[in-house]
Image (spheres, grey):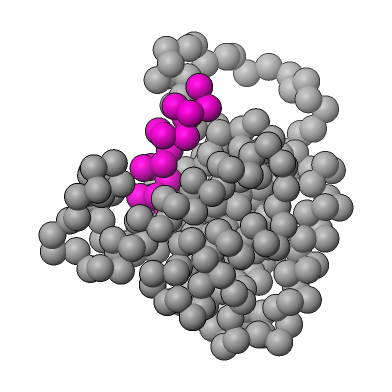
């Protein structure tokens, strides 16, 4: 079943994650490109590279499931796979320039502080992962990574891959954020600088929708709500 789930989400996650960042390929075009290897006429070459190389980073993400590991080497390699055909000199390494997030009033981490901030992130992962509900941890990981913004470009896509890596490692399905929810997603992420409850709940809703979708595809009735038995609850 894991192989079927991997193949099913490979198209959807690649298309939605790229579309959130302005990629012009449709879901059908993404499917033809990734499954049939056919190029799409009239689309920018960068958009094609983003789809093909995001799928490679997605495949790499699945190779990390058994280790339950999220470390610096894996995060750098994930970005390298995604960005190597777009801007090779910045693929798989932290930026050395200052960047701003369009539409955000909050600054990103200065280049000279990136190493320290990223080491702090990996320390937080090791320290707090087992103290949080898996969905809450995945949302927090996404938020913290984006706020640091370690790469010149591709931060949002790597953040969503890391979020879904964390979910998959703990037995959850990927949380898909469709382009139609882009405004909600961005506004909740911006608000998360002050209060991240809304963003965590948003990711939890996306996870729930993924579970409903898979149960529907496998024709399994969705269970009625009941008392949680895991001992971990979303705050």
The C terminus, quarter of image = top right
Q: Decide which of 73, 29 is in the foreground and name it.
A: 73
Residue at (76, 34) in percent of width and height = 233
**Along the horizontal axis of the image, is 235 left or right of 84?**
right
Q: Decide which of 84, 6 is in the foreground and name it.
A: 84
Residue at (81, 58) in percent of width and height = 124
Percent from the top left, x then y, of residue 179?
37, 52
Answer whether residue 78 is visible to the viewer in this image: yes
**Along the horizontal axis of the image, is 186 left or right of 147?**
left
Percent from the top left, x then y, of residue 203?
57, 45
Is 128 located above or below residue 123 in the figure? Answer: above
Residue at (73, 77) in percent of width and height = 115
- Most frequent secondary structure within the magenta stretch: helix
Which quarter of the figure has residue 114?
A: bottom right
Q: Which residues are magenta?
A: 1-17
Q: Decide which of 46, 213 is in the foreground and name it.
A: 46
**Along the horizontal axis of the image, is 229 left or right of 166?**
right
């Amino acid at each position: 079943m894991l192989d079927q789930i991997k193949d099913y989400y490979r198209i959807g996650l690649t298309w939605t994650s790229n579309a959130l960042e302005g990629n012009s390929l449709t879901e059908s075009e993404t499917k033809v490109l990734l499954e049939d290897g056919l190029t799409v006429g009239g689309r920018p070459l960068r958009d094609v590279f983003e789809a093909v190389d995001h799928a490679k980073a997605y495949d790499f993400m699945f190779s990390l499931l058994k280790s339950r590991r999220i470390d610096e080497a894996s995060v750098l390699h994930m970005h390298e796979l995604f960005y190597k055909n777009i801007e090779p000199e910045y693929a798989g390494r932290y930026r050395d320039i200052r960047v701003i997030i369009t539409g955000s009033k909050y600054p990103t981490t200065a280049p000279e502080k990136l190493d320290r901030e990223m080491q702090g992130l990996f320390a937080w992962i090791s320290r707090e992962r087992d103290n949080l509900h898996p969905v809450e941890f995945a949302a927090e990981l996404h938020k913290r990574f984006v706020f640091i913004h370690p790469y010149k470009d591709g931060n949002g896509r790597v953040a969503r891959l890391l979020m879904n890596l964390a979910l998959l490692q703990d037995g959850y399905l990927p949380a898909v954020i469709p382009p139609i929810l882009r405004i909600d997603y961005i506004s909740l992420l911006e608000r998360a600088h002050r209060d991240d409850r809304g963003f965590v709940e948003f990711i939890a809703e996306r996870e729930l929708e993924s579970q409903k979708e898979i149960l529907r595809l496998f024709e399994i009735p969705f269970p009625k709500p009941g008392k949680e038995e895991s001992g971990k609850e979303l705050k």
